[in-house]
Image: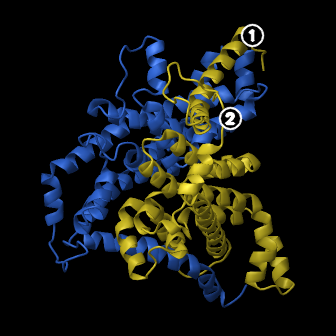
């Protein structure tokens, strides 16, 4: 059509590309480089090679954070992959009032994590409402120290992440459910296949792409958990809830060990990159 | 479909009611706490959901002790600037990527796509240093710039533009419109649903963002609502009535937006699912 197409195209691209360049691509290269230095914002920075990475391997706090993050992933992801399927099946019925209920289920998704964290800190109080409910239902005799006992704290924080994520993944499954052709169910119905069998043999297999996407998304999100921890426990008690991102945050912005924190950031990046690549492979297949 | 039996319907409603309680319960408890007067024991056993004498005292006390109106204004300014920048830059960049042939098209698109995989938690250290270097600490621009354009937005708008038939654009070219005019007058009106979905999607992200403002701000005059609520919680950690009031104050705006644009929230979430 036009000969000057190249220039026109670049003009359209310039604003977006300069922002992405300045705030994503250049910083990424810079982060890799910083991870090889002892930059700390105060003294002059030196190139130290792989020292930061070696130091990380010897740092028990880093290992604690890494293990906490993996534990987080292992516990949170299965729940966030499976439970929202049932939730989506439940709200995918033409019941009166279902639209309002769906909207209510979505409220935790739009609430900022700081507020969510505070709400749950209040619910988790030793003399709080959750302990009252548990005691009056006879589930426990003494109040549970949800956030102050090192054995409970990580799981209590995980529960909040799950509470927040349910509605979001429900919506993704809902979209998946609605793309399944109706006539499959009608045919099953004619052949006398029970509702439960239909779910098992039609719905779940056809939902596989959504299941795959949710698995990867929730895994990446679990690796990046920060706000819940910051608001509810500050990584404590006794570092029991210190996750990888919390470790990076502390090293960088409390101890100002920017080089060291960048090295930990690069390791986070490698993990999320693996997860993204799996995602890409799945989407390619689809 | 077959008609479900009455018991099945009742069971479904019981399950729905249980999950609704689990989801909405904590919000109601927060609201109830924020409305309880200072003389009412908020730790009483058994807990009381309905305040004995509902009062807005806690809200006035929060507004007196902390500039929550300012936090609200900051949040609105940052969200509006970020969302508009995102819409404009993403749809500008998406146009040539979707509908023009030019040198380097594929490589540019691949670079944009792969930038989605880089976690902000890795970038925050260099971005912090860049922002400090540019003098952007404690400024709206500093809060907005890292949100001003997302690769996801470009991807979403490209998909939307690709669905528009060529004939429309060709006839506009024949009529003598230039590319920018075509973008504005012909293409953008046709992708309004995608623009709305992107607007909502980026609005939620910016509105709830905590980590970036936490790093880049140390002047409370630029605090957005999440930071304000966090500050409130640190100041009055013992008084849950006030913390609850501040939290309620900060959720009201986004809940209002949600009520009026529900459809697009859901669409945004579904489209966001390809992001990963």
Residue farthest toward the right in the current orientation of the protein: B175
Residue farthest toward the front in the current orientation of the protein: B39
Q: Nearer the viewer, mark 1 or mark 2?
A: 2
Q: Is residue B118 visible?
A: no
The residue that disc 2 covers is: A102
Q: Identify the secondary structure beneath mark 1.
A: loop
Chain A color in figure: blue
In the rendered structure, are the residues bearing label 1 and label 2 in contact, judged by CB atoms less than 8 Å apart? no
Up-down: is A140 above or below B223?
Answer: above
Chain B color in figure: yellow
B269 with respect to A17 (left or right): right
B263 with respect to B49 (left or right): right
The residue that disc 1 covers is: B5
B5 with respect to B73 (left or right): right
Instruction: Provide residue A40's location: percent of width, then percent of height.
Output: 23, 71
Q: Nearer the viewer, residue B270 or B147?
A: B147
Q: Chain of mark 1?
A: B
Up-down: is B235 above or below A145?
Answer: below
Q: Residues within 10 Å of mark 2 (few under 14, many from 20)?
A: many
């Amino acid at each position: 059509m036009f000969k000057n197409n190249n220039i026109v195209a670049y003009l359209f691209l310039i604003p977006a590309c300069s922002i992405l360049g300045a705030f994503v691509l250049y910083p990424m290269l810079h982060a890799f480089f910083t991870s090889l230095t002892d930059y700390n914002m105060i003294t002059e920075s030196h190139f130290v090679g792989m020292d930061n990475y070696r130091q990380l391997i010897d740092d028990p706090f880093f290992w604690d954070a890494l293990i906490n993050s993996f534990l987080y992933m292992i516990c949170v992801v299965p729940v966030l992959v499976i439970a929202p399927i049932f939730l989506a099946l439940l709200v995918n019925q033409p019941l009166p009032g279902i639209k309002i209920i769906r909207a209510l289920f979505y409220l935790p998704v739009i609430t900022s994590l700081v507020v969510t964290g505070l709400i749950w800190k209040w619910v988790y109080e030793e003399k709080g409402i959750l302990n009252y409910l548990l005691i009056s239902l006879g589930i426990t005799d003494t109040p549970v120290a949800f956030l102050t006992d090192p054995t409970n704290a990580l799981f209590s924080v995980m529960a909040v992440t799950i509470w927040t994520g349910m509605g979001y993944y429900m919506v993704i499954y809902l979209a998946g459910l609605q793309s399944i052709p109706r006539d499959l169910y009608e045919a099953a119905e004619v052949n006398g296949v029970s509702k439960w069998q239909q779910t098992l043999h039609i719905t779940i297999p056809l939902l596989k792409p959504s299941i795959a996407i949710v698995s990867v998304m929730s895994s990446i999100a679990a690796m990046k958990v920060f706000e819940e921890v910051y608001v509810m426990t500050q990584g404590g008690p006794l570092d029991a809830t210190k996750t990888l991102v919390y470790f990076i945050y502390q090293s960088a912005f409390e101890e100002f060990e920017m080089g060291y924190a960048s090295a930990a950031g690069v390791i986070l990046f490698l993990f999320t990159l693996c997860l993204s690549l799996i995602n890409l492979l799945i989407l390619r297949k689809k | 479909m077959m008609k479900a039996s009455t018991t099945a319907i009742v069971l479904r409603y019981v399950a729905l009611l249980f999950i609704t309680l689990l989801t909405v319960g904590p919000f109601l408890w927060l609201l109830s706490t924020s409305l309880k007067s200072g003389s009412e024991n908020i730790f009483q056993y058994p807990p009381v959901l309905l305040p004995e004498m509902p009062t807005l005292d806690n809200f006035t006390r929060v507004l007196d002790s902390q500039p929550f109106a300012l936090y609200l204004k900051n949040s609105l300014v940052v969200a509006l600037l970020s969302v508009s920048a995102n819409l404009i830059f993403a749809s500008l960049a998406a146009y040539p990527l979707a509908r023009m042939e030019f040198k380097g098209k594929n490589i540019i698109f691949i670079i944009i796509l792969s930038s989605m995989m880089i976690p902000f938690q890795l970038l925050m250290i260099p971005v912090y240093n860049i922002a400090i270097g540019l003098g952007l600490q404690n400024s709206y621009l500093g809060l907005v710039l890292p949100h001003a354009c997302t690769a996801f937005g470009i991807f979403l708008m490209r998909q939307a533009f690709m669905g528009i038939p060529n004939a429309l654009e060709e006839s506009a070219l024949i009529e003598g419109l230039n590319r920018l005019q075509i973008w504005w007058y012909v293409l953008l009106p046709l992708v309004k649903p995608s623009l709305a979905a992107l607007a909502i999607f980026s609005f939620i992200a910016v509105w709830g963002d905590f980590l970036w403002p936490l790093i880049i701000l140390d002047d409370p005059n630029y605090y957005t609502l999440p930071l304000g609520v966090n500050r409130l919680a640190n100041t009055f950690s013992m008084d849950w009535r006030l913390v609850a009031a501040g939290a309620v104050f900060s959720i009201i705006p986004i809940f209002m937006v949600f009520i009026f644009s529900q459809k697009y929230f859901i669409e945004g979430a579904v489209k966001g699912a390809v992001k990963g």
